[in-house]
């Protein structure tokens, strides 16, 4: 059975209490933490450090709202040892937050690939680095998920990292917009990555091409969001489909008070 959640990227200025209220008022079963009170540096906030972390977890549990995952900007694309060490330290901090919240997943990225670096060495470094993060997070009961994004928007690029030795402790977060706009059908993505997909992002856009996209309220754009959800249901996917409204990166788009309730109305009416 599919459960629906949203990323707090869609309400970047919200407090924890506002996030919970939005989820509860609109029938969301869970949330994915990206922004809180205007920052992605969660551990810098008292709500996500020290005793505040346990208090935040209790707030979500008392409201019956699952913390599905924590979204990070973690990448292991650099070949520089110091840069890689900094990413591993950032991973430790984010894993502690995710584990403290009882979240199942930690989102990581693989790209984009730096043009100035040797491609083969870079791909091997990504595979080993993300594998290391995945194994570290697994020790805390959190699964790292590689998002389908950037140079890894199509399934062959993701599978190549596993062929290069990326640990199977790393799962996949399928961002449906990115695979779609890069020309891969939902059926092809699922056939290739289905056993590894643990979490799904959906969003709509008026234009969605390899060159870019412009977000639209769900059902008002050209992305076949309904088709993605129908396929997941048909394939027996049991997990969260999270609405990712990128308000934190695109402040000009509709406010969370519009977009987040709209998505759940669309879900109920589809």
Image (cartoon, rainbow, N blue to C red):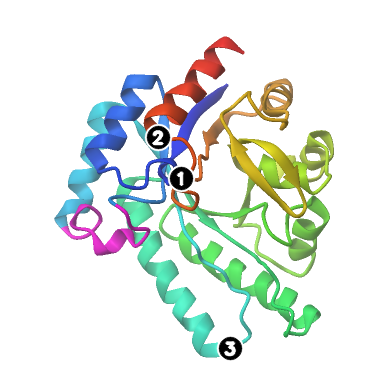
Q: Of callouts 3 and 1, which one flags the residue occurring earlier in the amino acid sequence?
A: 3
**Residue 116 location, x and y as percent?**
73, 85
Of helix, strand and loop, which one carries label 3?
loop
The structure residue drawn at horizontal position 67% and vertical position 52%, both measured from the top left corner, is: 148
**Residue 43 location, x and y as percent?**
29, 62
Specify the label residue 188 is tagged with: none
Nearest to viewer (mark 3 / mark 1) = 1
> Is the Cβ of the residue at disc 2 closer than 8 Å to that at disc 1?
yes
Label 1 belongs to which residue? 247
| Residue 202 makes an appearance in the image | no
The structure residue drawn at horizontal position 40% and vertical position 20%, both measured from the top left corner, is: 27
CA distance for labels 3 and 1 = 32 Å
Label 3 belongs to which residue? 80
Q: In the picture provided, is 16 more to the left or to the right than 34? A: left
Toward the front, the furthest residue is 252
Label 2 belongs to which residue? 256
Toward the top, the furthest residue is 269
Q: Is residue 30 above or below residue 56?
A: above
Image quadrant in which you'd find residue 81: bottom right
The structure residue drawn at horizontal position 33% and vertical position 29%, both measured from the top left corner, is: 22
Q: Is residue 242 above or below residue 231?
A: below
Residue 179 located within the stretch drawn in magenta: no
What range is drawn magenta here? 38-50
CA distance for labels 3 and 2 = 39 Å
**Residue 208 location, x and y as percent?**
73, 43
Toward the left, the furthest residue is 51
Q: Of callouts 2 and 1, which one flags the residue occurring earlier in the amino acid sequence?
A: 1
**Residue 190 location, x and y as percent?**
77, 38
């Amino acid at each position: 059975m599919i459960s629906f959640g949203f990323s707090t990227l869609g309400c970047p200025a919200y407090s924890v209490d506002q996030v919970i209220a939005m989820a509860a008022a609109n029938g969301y079963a869970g949330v994915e933490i990206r922004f809180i009170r205007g920052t992605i540096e969660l551990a810098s906030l008292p709500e996500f450090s020290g005793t505040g972390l346990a208090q935040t977890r209790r707030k979500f549990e008392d409201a019956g709202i699952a913390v599905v995952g924590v979204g990070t900007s973690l990448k292991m694309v650099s070949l520089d040892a110091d840069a890689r060490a900094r990413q591993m330290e950032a991973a430790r901090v984010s894993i502690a937050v995710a584990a403290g919240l009882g979240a199942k997943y930690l989102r990581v990225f693989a790209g984009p690939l730096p043009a100035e670096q040797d491609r083969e060495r870079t791909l091997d470094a990504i595979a080993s680095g993300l594998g290391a993060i995945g194994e570290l997070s697994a020790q805390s009961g959190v699964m790292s998920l590689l998002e389908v994004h950037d140079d890894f928007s199509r399934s062959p690029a993701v599978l190549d990292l596993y062929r290069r030795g990326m640990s199977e402790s790393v799962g996949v977060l399928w961002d449906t917009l990115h695979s779609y706009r890069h020309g891969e059908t939902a059926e092809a993505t699922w056939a290739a990555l289905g056993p590894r997909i643990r979490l799904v992002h959906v969003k709509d856009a008026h234009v969605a091409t390899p060159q870019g996209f412009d977000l639209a309220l769900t059902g008002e754009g050209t992305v076949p969001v309904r088709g993605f959800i129908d396929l997941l249901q048909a394939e027996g996917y049991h997990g969260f489909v999270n609405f990712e409204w990128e308000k934190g990166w695109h402040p000009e788009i509709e406010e969370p008070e519009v977009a987040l309730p709209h998505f759940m109305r669309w879900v109920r009416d589809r």
